[in-house]
Image: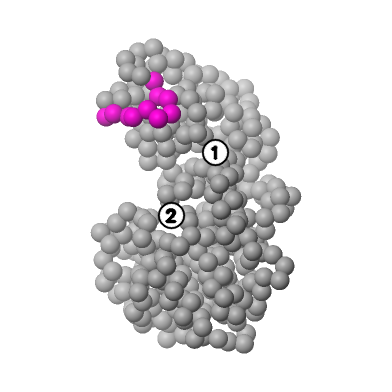
Amino acid sequence: MRLSFTPTTEPYEIRERLGRLLAPGSLLDDRLERRIARLGDRFVSYAASYPLPLWAPGLEITPEMRGMTEALFPLAEPRALFEKVLRRGCRFAPLLSGTYLESSASWLDLLQRLSPQLPCADPTPSLRRLACDDAARTAFLFALMLPQHFGGGFDRYPRQLSWISMWMKGSRRADGIRVLDAACGSGEGTYQVAQLLVEAGMGKGSAVHGSTLEPIELFAGAHMYFPHASEREREYRNRAGSLLGPGANAPALEFYLDRVDAPPQREPYDLVLCNGLLGGPLLHDPAELASAFAGLSARLAPGGLLLAADRFHAGWRQRVPEEYLIALMRAHGLTPVEVPEGIAGKKG
């Protein structure tokens, strides 16, 4: 699926573009209704035989609750229907394997993690609502793919940003520079780099792109759009929205779908960022890491820089030592550069 967006927060444009990703209207048919009804019968049987309090928001889940619920009402049963509804509602194949649908230990844990999107212990009202209401389905999908603690947010790498700011001021070029925020997530870092270019007087003539392999992340970043989290959306737009306004002297901004290990889709970049990915829980297999460094190196122009840091995923240094990542940089034509946060390499 080839997908790219220039950023906008205009409501009509957002609605039109969202139609490229998500199917509108009701998805409920007789077959799906029968499956939901059967799941409802299973839940009634579970509730009648479960000797402990049923889940409600704020309930403290104990190992006994978790184990008994998984025995009587296995997560696999509601999970299958939630995934069916979500896949039917998407015009692309959503990457559900890394979400709470797959990682939760029990139905109780999923309820706890997705409250208030899932407001009651019985999954059937939520499933019918998601199947019938495209707005509710959109909010649920964004909540599932973009939970706050997955790394979204500004100012994650302040020392890296300070270093980039100094580098930009020492790299003034009349024709501007090209920057890629690879694996950009929901795009906060992309806009922060764009703001640094504006502050350095290099906005006009420069380009800043964000790329990710996940369409919902891509859409959220390009449109500062979080239908499941109004406060997060408001803060995001307050922070970065000025870059889209008239007279902002901002660089050309674009978000596009891409894998870091795929052949480049755009002209080479002078600076490539790849934060929160290399060597962490999402990418630590040796062969996959080598492919990622090859792809990132291929995106750099001669003399270009790759910067990578990771502070928010669980224990990247425990998975892959920094020395191993530096060795991979060398193996793919990058000379290590000392930076105050993360690692960096310069293409010869």
- Asked which secondary structure carries label 2, the reply is loop
Q: Is residue 346 above or below residue 233?
A: below
The local crowd at label 1, few if under 14, some if 14 to 19, many if 20 or more residues have their Cα within 10 Å, is: many
The local crowd at label 2, few if under 14, some if 14 to 19, many if 20 or more residues have their Cα within 10 Å, is: some
- Asked which secondary structure carries label 1, the reply is helix
In the image, what residue occupies the spot 44% across and 78% down?
305
Q: Earlier in the sequence, mark 2 or mark 1?
A: 1
In the image, what residue occupies the spot 63% across and 29% down?
132
Horizontal placement of 155 versus 72: left or right?
right
Residue 211 picture location, percent across and down: 53, 63
Q: CA distance from mark 2 to mark 1?
A: 18 Å
Is 108 in front, or is 235?
235
Reading the image, the residue beneath label 2 is 151
Instruction: Give amino acid for label 2.
Output: Gly
Toward which corner of the image does residue 70 lie, by quadrant? top left
Horizontal placement of 244 versus 124: left or right?
right
Residue 2 picture location, percent across and down: 61, 59
Toward which corner of the image does residue 295 lie, by quadrant? bottom left
Whether residue 258 can be seen here: no
Q: Is residue 158 above or below residue 45?
A: below
Q: Is residue 293 above or below residue 217?
A: below
In the image, what residue occupies the spot 26% across and 72% down?
323
Reading the image, the residue beneath label 1 is 140
Query: How has the structure been colored for display?
Result: one colour
